Image: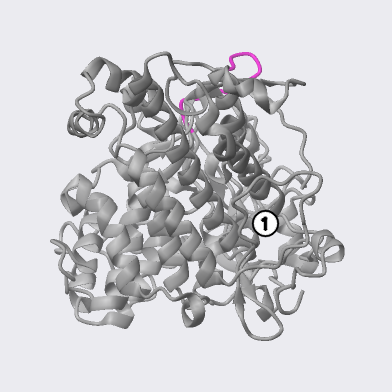
Amino acid sequence: MKKIITICAFAACLTGCDDLFEPAIENNLGLEYMYENSQYAEGILANAYTRIPCAGYSFNDVATDDAVSNDAENSWRKIASGMWTANNNPADRWTSCRSAIQYINLFLANADKVKWAKDEVVAQMFCDREKAEAYGLRAMYMYYLLEAHAGYTEDGVLMGVPILTEPEAAGSNFNVPRSTFVDCMKALKEDARLALEGLPWEYGDAAEMQRLSAKYAGADQSKVTRVFGANFIGRMSGKVVEAFVAKADLLAASPAYSDQSGIDWKTAAASAAKVLNHIGGVDGMDPTGWTWYCNADDIENLSPTESPAEILWRGERAKSLSLEEDNFPPTLYGNGRINPTQNLVDAFPMLNGYPVSHQSGEYDENLPYANRDPRLEAYILYNGGKAGNTNKEIFTAADGTTNDALNKVVGRSTRTGYYLRKLLRQDISLDPNAKADQYHYTPRIRYTEIFLAYAEAANQAYGPQNKGGNSYSAYDVMKKLRHRAGIGLDNGDAYLESIKNDQAKMAELIRNERRIELCFEGFRFWDLRRWKSNLTEAAKGMNISGTRYTPMEVDKRSFSEYMYYGPIPYSEVLKYDELKQNQGW
């Protein structure tokens, strides 16, 4: 693909996360300029960083049974209603990810020619580290391309995407066929291997600094710190690379891909364990990790080179109001955009750990929010719940008198009887007379995601309680995860204990915990597809009038079976006859 290179000014001494990069500036300098100017070279790599898909929230939950939107123009709402096509695809990653890979390949083709520093040892360290970052980024983008575009072609072969390892120019052959899923996974893992050769597990880690000093013939610590010090935290590191390998292996081992992926559950469990063993397994689980987004003290005191214990990789910390403006209810001056469903509310168990559908006698349909999993109140704003910096009581009932009431104002009020609470800072004020923003950051990867990946894979590979050579099992992860949320504290989590020898029921519980813990963070849309689960379950809400609670259907879901796999963009298939489309598209 023919590209115009946009260069980011890239500071020589960098600090964490997205604030690594200065705003992009257009530049007409040729590639040769980078050989004597390392900042220009880093600007090429910076272009790859700016396209990271997990840098923000997609709210693709709106295309699932977890949420609807009150915005009629929401693209996820549209595709859930049957408007998903190969040229109308909000899940598309083809253009952005392949563009990032083009910058990566440009960088790798020229990095060895760059004068990184006057000191030869420092120059070699910089060159090795920067190239390793590029390989790690390319592995990451391959994962995202496979998640969005891998699928079975009409001849029944599981295909991935074209594997590109050289920069494309005007004279390049752009009519390149897709590689098999297996070959794409091999390419991903080879890039990961090359990345891990040159990256520390984490920048500034004392043990890693010693290892790197030895690797570079005893380079003194000041030189090692200059290249691998904590001021580079936020860039691609060894733990981030291993996390993406774990994510890719989980995808490949899942039912939608496992027949032809070459990856099994044991491999996926081992990949997740590699990451978790570095924090001590289940003992390293952050006890406040389920409220990371509103742990005010952690967020306020976060330096550019730090992350909370829950966060494996994060984005920039910055003050904003946008999430709250979009999602606070109308009486708090918000637009109530994302409305959780009754389907999701029903997924939260009772406080004693039993599902609401279980014959434990705890669930009261006349008091449906009483004695529930504490995460329900934390993540979803229901009728009578409190929100905002004034702790205001919000009424979503159909007979409510404010604009928060069910379907009161088109485009602002809830359509399900629920508003989003997760991700939002309740200490923010949107009052026009007293606006007050607060710090936020985006977790690109949470350790909870990796714990859940391990639990899913280990249960399938070994059963609920077999540790598979590690010091913890799927059961151990579930026990710890639910305990930290306050589940089953009075009864020893009797439900979990009752299913700890049942692989199928444990698998169901793990999927449900994943649904709860990762809700609204961009997982449900992809999880349903890799599991080959029901895509057409109608989105439901709760109509409350007086003391009557009546479940209702809000939106139908219209997906065909071939939509377990996303399409190759229609425009690309039209241009290049070697690109074979996935079945059905």
Amino acid on which disc 1 is placed: Ala
Identified at 21% across, 68% down, the residue is: 475
Question: Is 539 placed above or below 190 here?
Answer: below
| Camera-side residue of 496 and 238 | 238
Q: Which residues are magenta?
A: 425-435
Identified at 76% across, 51% down, the residue is: 172
* Residue 215 placement, left or right of 97: left
For disc 1, the neighbor class at 10 Å (few under 14, some 14 to 19, many from 20) is some
Question: Is 476 placed above or below 170 here?
Answer: below
SS label for mark 1 = loop
- Residue 231 visible in the current orientation: no
Q: Which residue is mark 1?
A: 91
User: How is the protein colored in the picture?
Assistant: one colour
Residue 38, given in percent of the width and then of the height, sits at: 54, 20
Quadrant for the C terminus, please. Answer: bottom right
Count of marks, rendered view: 1
- The answer to whether residue 458 is magenta is no
